[in-house]
Image (cartoon, rainbow, N blue to C red):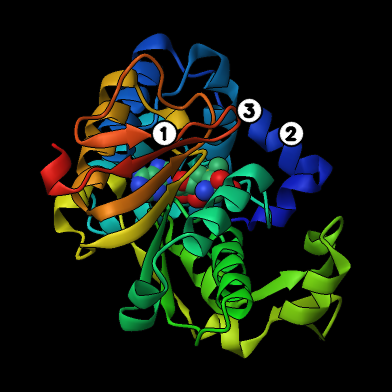
Amino acid sequence: MAENRNDLSTAEGIWSLRRLPDMDEAQFNQWQTLLEHRTGMTLSEGRKSFLETNLAIRMREIGCNSYQAYYEKIVSGPDAIVEWATLVDRLTVQETRFFRDPDAFRLVSDYVLTRPREALKKRPLEVWSVGASTGEEPYTLAMVLNECMETLSLKPLYGVTGSDISKPAIDKAKTGRFSARKLIGMDEAMKNRYFHPAERNTVEIVESIRDRVCFTRLNVLDLKKAPMHGMNIIFCQNLLIYFRRWRRREIVKRLAERLAPGGLLVLGQGELTDWQPPGLQRVPSEHVLAWIKRQPDEE
Ligand SMILES: C[S@@+](CC[C@H](N)C(=O)[O-])C[C@H]1O[C@@H](n2cnc3c(N)ncnc32)[C@H](O)[C@@H]1O
């Protein structure tokens, strides 16, 4: 009988988890290849036990008792697509928080505040958070943009899209509801302005911000399918870090194509080294890795 995830905390659950045989090298390679091919993420040898544990948990849940049988289910079983969607959520690192990289958000704010006023009045500012996880990053971007528009005494003409490969993460993000603990350390004024208390020690993002943010499921390896174009700001942090260098470069090139001329691309510190993406100009900053897309006449 399938056990649920919580059963694993019982002595019996832990005992039965341990009974799964160790994954041999060939099996580990097979899973590494599958994961990298489908998500871009590389799994180092040091993460083998992470993989084993998470596979074991899922296999217990569905009553599958060998890594090979589960692999077959994922690649060719009748529920392969649904099962893969569940597994990928378990294997991706979804750690995130509001205002995670304050310097990067300050840069976004400076960028918006120094744009020509007429441009901000005429056309909505389009912002994209790539690898948005459970939504803290795109909501933070929306709060930053809202603050900018207020400072400039302009209407809040902007939209933020958050995309991620994980459906459960996106579903959670859409709710706009977070544990109150997520706000620890956040500026009090920002907390009071943008969140209100909800039931059972949770908080909710205020509607004026929620209305500006939308979410979509998107694999960053499938950027060709992405409908985003002419973005003013693309924010992609703590995602490329799990990818090989050649793939990071490929993705950055694809993201740059989606920027409007003069648009801003922000990555996480150290996520792209020793390479200058074509058509982009590095923003001089010690603490933030960012570029501006050159205007066509600057090429
Ligand atoms: C560590 S979180 C980063 C969240 C946020 N950007 C931040 O910096 O706080 C990485 C996110 O990337 C997502 N991810 C991993 N592989 C992906 C892929 N191939 N396409 C899109 N998202 C992916 C994961 O699901 C996860 O939510």
Residue picked out by circle 2: 15
Which quadrant would residue 231 be assigned to in this image?
A: bottom left
For marks 2 and 1 on the same chain, the one whose residue lies earlier in the sequence: 2
Dot 1 amino acid type: Leu
- Residue 152 x/y as whole percent: 57, 76
Q: What residue is shown at x 12% (from left), y 45% (from top)?
A: 297
**Are discs 2 and 3 less than 8 Å apart at CB?**
yes
Q: What residue is shown at x 15% (from left), y 58% (from top)?
A: 225
Q: Secondary structure at mark 1?
A: helix
Q: What residue is shown at x 27% (from left), y 36% (from top)?
A: 280
Residue picked out by circle 1: 240
Question: In the figure, is residue 16 to the left or right of 252?
Answer: right
**Are discs 1 and 3 less than 8 Å apart at CB?**
no
Question: In the figure, is residue 200 to the left or right of 39?
Answer: right
**Callout 2 crowding tier (Cα within 10 Å): few <14, some 14–19, many ≥20:** few
Q: Secondary structure at mark 2?
A: helix
- Looking at the image, residue 92 lies above or below residue 33: below
**Are discs 2 and 1 less than 8 Å apart at CB?**
no
Asked if residue 63 shows in the view, the reply is: no
Residue picked out by circle 3: 19
